[in-house]
C-alpha cells in the first residue's frame, strides 16, 4: 500500500479511538468516564435508529414488500453521505493543513487524491453500516437467510458510500474551479449549510405532512402507506439501490451478478474518478489554497482612522465579529435566527391545511388566560434564544490567545461583560425574528407575544451567565479546529440543556402554584421578579469569583 | 544546485507582487542564506521552489531536474523543513519518520542508521515514541529536521529553521548544515538571525518586495557596499528606496 494512503488510513483509525478523543490532558479515569458517556450516547442513538427502522420494516412486511426496505435504506444512506459528507469531503480534499507539506513530498497527485478519498470512506462506511446492518439483519431473519447472506451483505454495505462520495467529489471539483466564488467561500459555506438545514426541515415536513400523531408503529405504517409510491420510486431513481436489494434478495447466479454489479460500479467509480480527476487534483488544491491569499491581498477597503472606542466596546465588537466572521461559529450560533422563523412560516404556509389549522387554534389560544400566553411565549423565546453555543464557549474559543487576554490592561470584569453582551446579542438575534414572525402571523396575540419576548430576556440572561461561568471553570483551550472549539464542548451542550431546564422548572413551579390555588397573575410576576434577582446574584458572582477563576485558567 | 529563472508570483489580480522576476543560482557545496525583511517574499519563494505554490511564470531546476516537468523526481532531490508543523499530530515521532522513509523509499538499514544517529544528536530518543501532539514547538522542529534528511537529499531547504530551537539544537543544526555542504550538497535556508547567516553562509541573497536586490559571497558584498557587518549591509540594502 502506498505510504501516504497507509498513513491517512492509520491516522483515521486512531481518531476512532474513543479515549484519544479527549486529549492528552485528561486523566485515565476521566477518559474512561467520558468514553462511557459517549458509548451510552451512541447506544441511545443506535437504539432509536433501530427502533424506527424496525417499525418501518414491519410496515413494509405488512404491505408484502419487505425487500423495498433494503432499497430504501440504501437510498437514505446515500443521501445522508452526500449531504453530511459534503463538507467533510470538501475540506479533506481541499482545506487540510497537511496539503502544503505533502505537496513538497514526492507523492503523485493521484495517490494523494486516492488516500484522501479512502480516508473519508472509512468514516462514511461506518454511517452506511450503522444505517443498513439493522435492516439487513431484520430482512435476513424474516427471509430465513444463512450465514453467507450476512457475510456478503456486510461486504456489500461497505461499498455503499463510494458512489455518493464520487458525486460529491465531482461537485467539489466544480465548485473549487469556480475560483471567483471561492473568494467568498466562507460565505458560501454558510449559505450551503443553511440551505441544507432548510432542505432537511422541508423534507421532514413534507414526509410527515400526511401523518397524524400516534405511536411509532402507527407513524411508520402511515409513512409507508402515504409515501408508498415515492419510496418504491427511490430504487428506480437510484438503480444501485435496486441492485443492492436484488443481490441480497435473490440467490444463485442472479443474486451474484447483482452483487458484482453493485460492488463493481462503486469501486469502479472510485478508481475512474481517481484516474480522471486525480491528475489535476494537486494543482487544483494548491490553487485553491492560494485563492484565499489572493482574496486577502485584493482587499482594498481602507477605512482611514478608526473610531476611538472604550475597551469594553472594542472587546464586545471583537467578540461579535469573531462569531460573524467564522462560518463554523456563525452556523452554530446564529442559524436559529433564520431557522425558527422559517419553520413557523413553513408550518403555516406550506401545508394547505396549515392555515386552517392555525385559524382553528387562534380562537382557542385567544380564550386562554393572557398571563399564561405571556408565560408560554416567554418560555418559547427563552428556549429558542438558549439554542446557541456562543456564550457558553466564549472562554474556550479564546484557545491559545487566552494568555494574551490576561495580559490586556483591561479589568477582567470588562472582558467577561463583553462576552456576556455578545451572548445576549446573539440570543436577541435568534428570538427577535421569531417574535416578529409570530406577531405578524397572529396579530390578535401581538401584545402577549411582545411581553413574552421582553420577559424571556430575564431567563435567557440567567442561562447565559451560568454557561459563561461554567466555561470559565472548565475551559477547553487545546482545540485544533473551530468545530472542535464550539461543537465538541460539553459546557455548550450543558448550556443548551440548561435553557430547557430553566423553562421546565418554571413551568413546574407555575403548575404547582395553580394546583395549590395561587393565581397565575400572582405567581408569574413573582417568578419574573425571582429571575431578575437571580440575574443580579449570578452577575455579581460572575464578576467576583468568575473574574478570579478567569485569571487562573491556563492556556494550552 | 538550485536554479531559479525569472520566477514571478502575484496576488490580488496581479496587483500585489509577492515574487517579481526572481533569477538566481545556488551552486552545490554552498550554504546559502536567503534574507529579507518581513513580507519580502522569502517563504513564497521557498514554497514555489518546493512545489507547494505554483509560479505564475518562470522555471526552477533542482539538480538539473525541471520542477514543472518532473515534479516527483525534483521533489526527491530535496529535504524540506517548513516554518510550521501543523499535521499528523496523532502519530508518534517514530511513525512520522517511518512515513517519510517510506515516501522516499529509504531502505531499512539506511533509515535505521539515520534515525540512530540523529535522535541522540537532537536529544529526542525518549520522546520519539510519544505522540507528536505532546511535543513542544522546538521538539516538532527537531523532528522535522531529522525527517527532512532521512533520504540524504542533495538539496536541503529550510524555512526559518532556528525558530524555537534551544542553543544546543541550534548548534547541532549548524553543524549538520556544514556537514552537508562539505559533502558537496546544497543548503538553502531563510533566516532573520543575521549573526547565524554571517557565520554560516558561503553566499547570501537578499530579497525585498519580491525582487532579489543582492546575491553573492558575503565578503564581496560587504566590500562592495563598504559595510563592516552583515547587519550594516542588510539594513543599508533593504532601506534603500523604502
Image (tube, rainbow, N blue to C red):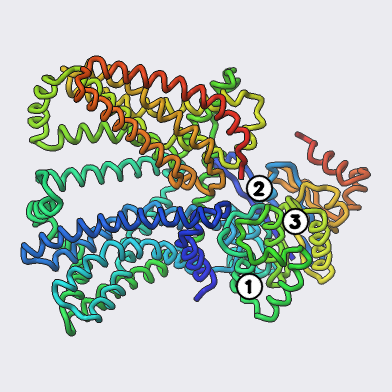
Residue at left 56%, top 47%? A478
Mark 1: secondary structure:
helix
Residue at left 25%, top 22%? A375
Image vertical order of residue A520 relative to residue A68, above or below: above
Residues flagged by tags 3 and 1 on a common chain? yes
Q: Quadrant of residue A80?
A: bottom left
Return the residue at label 3.
B189
Res A279 visible: no
Q: Residues within 10 Å of mark 3 (few under 14, many from 20)?
A: many
Seen in the image, is A328 located left or right of residue A358? right
Between disc 2 and disc 3, whose residue precedes?
2
Q: Nearer the viewer, residue B161 or A413?
A: A413
Image vertical order of residue A206 relative to residue A258, above or below: above
Tell me which chain the residue with mark 1 is part of.
B
Image mark for residue B85 = none
Return the residue at label 1.
B101
Q: Position of residue A32 (x, y in %)?
A: 48, 57
Q: Position of residue A222 (x, y in %)?
A: 9, 52
Q: Residues within 10 Å of mark 2 (few under 14, many from 20)?
A: many
Q: Position of residue A90 (x, y in %)?
A: 42, 54
Disc 3/disc 1 C-alpha distance (Å): 22 Å
Q: Nearer the viewer, residue B223 or B168?
A: B168
Q: Position of residue A368 (x, y in %)?
A: 14, 21
Quadrant containing the C terminus of chain B in the rendered view: top right
Tell me which chain the residue with mark 3 is part of.
B
Return the residue at label 2.
B19
Between disc 1 and disc 2, whose residue precedes?
2
Tell me which chain the residue with mark 2 is part of.
B
Q: Nearer the viewer, mark 3 or mark 1?
A: 1
Disc 1/disc 2 C-alpha distance (Å): 33 Å
Q: Residues within 10 Å of mark 1 (few under 14, many from 20)?
A: many
Amino acid at each position: 500500500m502506498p505510504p501516504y494512503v497507509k498513513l491517512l488510513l492509520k491516522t483515521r483509525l486512531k481518531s476512532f479511538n474513543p479515549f484519544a478523543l479527549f486529549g492528552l490532558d485528561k486523566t485515565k479515569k476521566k477518559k474512561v468516564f467520558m468514553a462511557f458517556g459517549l458509548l451510552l450516547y451512541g447506544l441511545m442513538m443506535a437504539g432509536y435508529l433501530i427502533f424506527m427502522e424496525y417499525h418501518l420494516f414491519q410496515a413494509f412486511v405488512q404491505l408484502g414488500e419487505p425487500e423495498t426496505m433494503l432499497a430504501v435504506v440504501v437510498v437514505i444512506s446515500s443521501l445522508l453521505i452526500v449531504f453530511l459528507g459534503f463538507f467533510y469531503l470538501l475540506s479533506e480534499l481541499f482545506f487540510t493543513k497537511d496539503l502544503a507539506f505533502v505537496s513538497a513530498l514526492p507523492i503523485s497527485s493521484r495517490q494523494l487524491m486516492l488516500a484522501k478519498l479512502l480516508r473519508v470512506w472509512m468514516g462514511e462506511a461506518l454511517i452506511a453500516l450503522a444505517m443498513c446492518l439493522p435492516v439487513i439483519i431484520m430482512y435476513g431473519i424474516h427471509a430465513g437467510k444463512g450465514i453467507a447472506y450476512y457475510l456478503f451483505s456486510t461486504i456489500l454495505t461497505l461499498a455503499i458510500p463510494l458512489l455518493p462520495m464520487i458525486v460529491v467529489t465531482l461537485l467539489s471539483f466544480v465548485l473549487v474551479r469556480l475560483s471567483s466564488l471561492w473568494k467568498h467561500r466562507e460565505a458560501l459555506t454558510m449559505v450551503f449549510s443553511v440551505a441544507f438545514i432548510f432542505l432537511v426541515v422541508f423534507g421532514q415536513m413534507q414526509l410527515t405532512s400526511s401523518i397524524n400523531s400516534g405511536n411509532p408503529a402507527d407513524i411508520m405504517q402511515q409513512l409507508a402507506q402515504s409515501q408508498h409510491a415515492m419510496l418504491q420510486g427511490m430504487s428506480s431513481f437510484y438503480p444501485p439501490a435496486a441492485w443492492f436489494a436484488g443481490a441480497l434478495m435473490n440467490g444463485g447466479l442472479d443474486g451474484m451478478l447483482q452483487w458484482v454489479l453493485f460492488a463493481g460500479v462503486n469501486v469502479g467509480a472510485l478508481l475512474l474518478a481517481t484516474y480522471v480527476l486525480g491528475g489535476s487534483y494537486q494543482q487544483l488544491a494548491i490553487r485553491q489554497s492560494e485563492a484565499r491569499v489572493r482574496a486577502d491581498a485584493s482587499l482594498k477597503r481602507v477605512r482611514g482612522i478608526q473610531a476611538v472606542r472604550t475597551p469594553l466596546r472594542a472587546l464586545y465588537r471583537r467578540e461579535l465579529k469573531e462569531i460573524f466572521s467564522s462560518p463554523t461559529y456563525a452556523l452554530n450560533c446564529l442559524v436559529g435566527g433564520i431557522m425558527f422563523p422559517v419553520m413557523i412560516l413553513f408550518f403555516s404556509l406550506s401545508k394547505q391545511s396549515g392555515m386552517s389549522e392555525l385559524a382553528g387554534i387562534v380562537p382557542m389560544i385567544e380564550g386562554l388566560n393572557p398571563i399564561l400566553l405571556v408565560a408560554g411565549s416567554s418560555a418559547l423565546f427563552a428556549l429558542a434564544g438558549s439554542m446557541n453555543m456562543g456564550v457558553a464557549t466564549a472562554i474556550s474559543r479564546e484557545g491559545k490567545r487566552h494568555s494574551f487576554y490576561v495580559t490586556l490592561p483591561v479589568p477582567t470584569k470588562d472582558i467577561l461583560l463583553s462576552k456576556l453582551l455578545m451572548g445576549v446579542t446573539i440570543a436577541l438575534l435568534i428570538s427577535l425574528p421569531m417574535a416578529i414572525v409570530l406577531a405578524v402571523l397572529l396579530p390578535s396575540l401581538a401584545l402577549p407575544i411582545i411581553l413574552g419576548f421582553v420577559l424571556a430576556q430575564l431567563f435567557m440572561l440567567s442561562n447565559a451567565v451560568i454557561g459563561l461561568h461554567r466555561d470559565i471553570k472548565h475551559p477547553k483551550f487545546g482545540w485544533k479546529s473551530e468545530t472542535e472549539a464550539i461543537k465538541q464542548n460539553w459546557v455548550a451542550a450543558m448550556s443548551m440543556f440548561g435553557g430547557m431546564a430553566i423553562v421546565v422548572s418554571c413551568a413546574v413551579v407555575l403548575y404547582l402554584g395553580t394546583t395549590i390555588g395561587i393565581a397565575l397573575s400572582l405567581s408569574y410576576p413573582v417568578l419574573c421578579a425571582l429571575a431578575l434577582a437571580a440575574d443580579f446574584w449570578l452577575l455579581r458572582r460572575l464578576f467576583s469569583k468568575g473574574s478570579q477563576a478567569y485569571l487562573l485558567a491556563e492556556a494550552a | 544546485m538550485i536554479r531559479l529563472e525569472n520566477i514571478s508570483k502575484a496576488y490580488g489580480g496581479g496587483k500585489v507582487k509577492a515574487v517579481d522576476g526572481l533569477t538566481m543560482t545556488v551552486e552545490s557545496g554552498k550554504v546559502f542564506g536567503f534574507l529579507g525583511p518581513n513580507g519580502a517574499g522569502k517563504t513564497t519563494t521557498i514554497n514555489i521552489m518546493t512545489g507547494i505554490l505554483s509560479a505564475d511564470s518562470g522555471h526552477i531546476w533542482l539538480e538539473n531536474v525541471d520542477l514543472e516537468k518532473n515534479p516527483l523526481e525534483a521533489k526527491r532531490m530535496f529535504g524540506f523543513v517548513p516554518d510550521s508543523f501543523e499535521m499528523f499530530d496523532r502519530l508518534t515521532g517514530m511513525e512520522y519518520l517511518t512515513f517519510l522513509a517510506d515516501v522516499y523509499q529509504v531502505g531499512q538499514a539506511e533509515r535505521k542508521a539515520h534515525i540512530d544517529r540523529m535522535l541522540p544528536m537532537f536529544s529526542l530518543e525518549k520522546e520519539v515514541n510519544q505522540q507528536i501532539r505532546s511535543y513542544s514547538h522546538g521538539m516538532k522542529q527537531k523532528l522535522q529536521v531529522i525527517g527532512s534528511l532521512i533520504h540524504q537529499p542533495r538539496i536541503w531547504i529550510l524555512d526559518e529553521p532556528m525558530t524555537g530551537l534551544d542553543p544546543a539544537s541550534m548548534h547541532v543544526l549548524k553543524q549538520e548544515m556544514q556537514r552537508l555542504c562539505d559533502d558537496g550538497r546544497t543548503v538553502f535556508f531563510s533566516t532573520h538571525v543575521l549573526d547565524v547567516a554571517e557565520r554560516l553562509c558561503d553566499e547570501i541573497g537578499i530579497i525585498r518586495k519580491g525582487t532579489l536586490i543582492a546575491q553573492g559571497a558575503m565578503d564581496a558584498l560587504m566590500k562592495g557596499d563598504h559595510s563592516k557587518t552583515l547587519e550594516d549591509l542588510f539594513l543599508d540594502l533593504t532601506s534603500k528606496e523604502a
